[in-house]
Amino acid sequence: MREPTLSPVASPCFPPVAYVCRGARRYAPGTPSQAYARVRLDPVVGAAIADAYVAAPQGDERAYAAYAAFCRETVQQYHLLVGRAEFGGLGVTVRIVDEDPYPDVESMIDDVWQRRLKVFASAASGNPHPYLSDGENDMFRAVHDVFGHAGSGRGFDRHGEEAAWLTHSTMYSPLAARAMTTETRGQNCAQIFRYGGRRFAEQKAALLPRLFSDPRLVRTAAAAEASRLVPR
């Protein structure tokens, strides 16, 4: 996990990595081709998501079907990420390292353009997951950095994390996306709005209310705001 900031000003956007976007659309043909530069996380929504995450149990058997789907689909995405180009993969070389490898998103994006990525090892975090193995967690970190951040053109601030969740969730089935939301939107909001960015939230295998897991609601809210700003 990264350390999202509390700044209300979004960090600069950058052009999404083109081969990553093509790979995402090939993996999930229904993936919308849209710009994520305007995505913002409303602090009221973020605080509500944080409260829901903190209140959730560490492990909930009702979430396990979603987590099983999430694991299967993450492994599939990882195979796409590291697979050889001649066989339809993206050919990215992933290395698991024992310390946070990137001081900023620009450093990571430079690596992704070179088809390589370093991932901070889950085993080194001291924050074990109640459902995912360290290997599964590392795979998710890799695919989320690439398909979420490099694919959206957004960084590690709170608005960038919201855009990365919104982008990457389109590659998951509705069931798996609920677990993916806990792993991204839920953890990030808890870290930001409950712990002030000072520490990582405890990892959990539970589901947030559906209200917080549906990307369509984010797009609907954004469309409503845009229409409000259009002169009549």
Image (tube, rainbow, N blue to C red):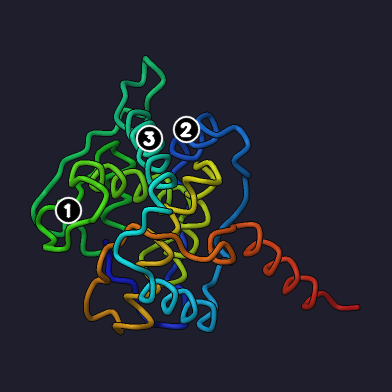
Name the residue at 17% across, 63% down. Answer: 127
Residue 141 horizontal/vertical position (percent): 29, 50
Earlier sequence position, callout 1 versus callout 2:
2
Amino acid type, residue under disc 2 in the picture: Gly
Q: Is residue 128 above or below residue 42?
A: above
Residue 162 horizontal/vertical position (percent): 48, 65
Q: Say left or right for 175 vs 226.
A: left
Between 29 and 209, the one lying in front of the other is 209
Residue marked by disc 1: 122
Residue marked by disc 2: 23
Q: Residues within 10 Å of mark 3 (few under 14, many from 20)?
A: few
How far separated are the C-alphas under marks 1 and 2?
25 Å
Name the residue at 52% across, 73% down. Answer: 41
Amino acid type, residue under disc 1 in the picture: Ser
Between 163 and 116, the one lying in front of the other is 163
Q: Say left or right for 149 vs 169.
A: left
Which quadrant is the C terminus positioned in?
A: bottom right
Amino acid type, residue under disc 3 in the picture: Arg
Between 51 and 217, the one lying in front of the other is 51
How far separated are the C-alphas under marks 1 and 3?
18 Å
Residue marked by disc 3: 72
How far separated are the C-alphas under marks 3 and 2?
18 Å
Q: Secondary structure at mark 1?
A: helix
Between disc 3 and disc 2, the foreground one is 3
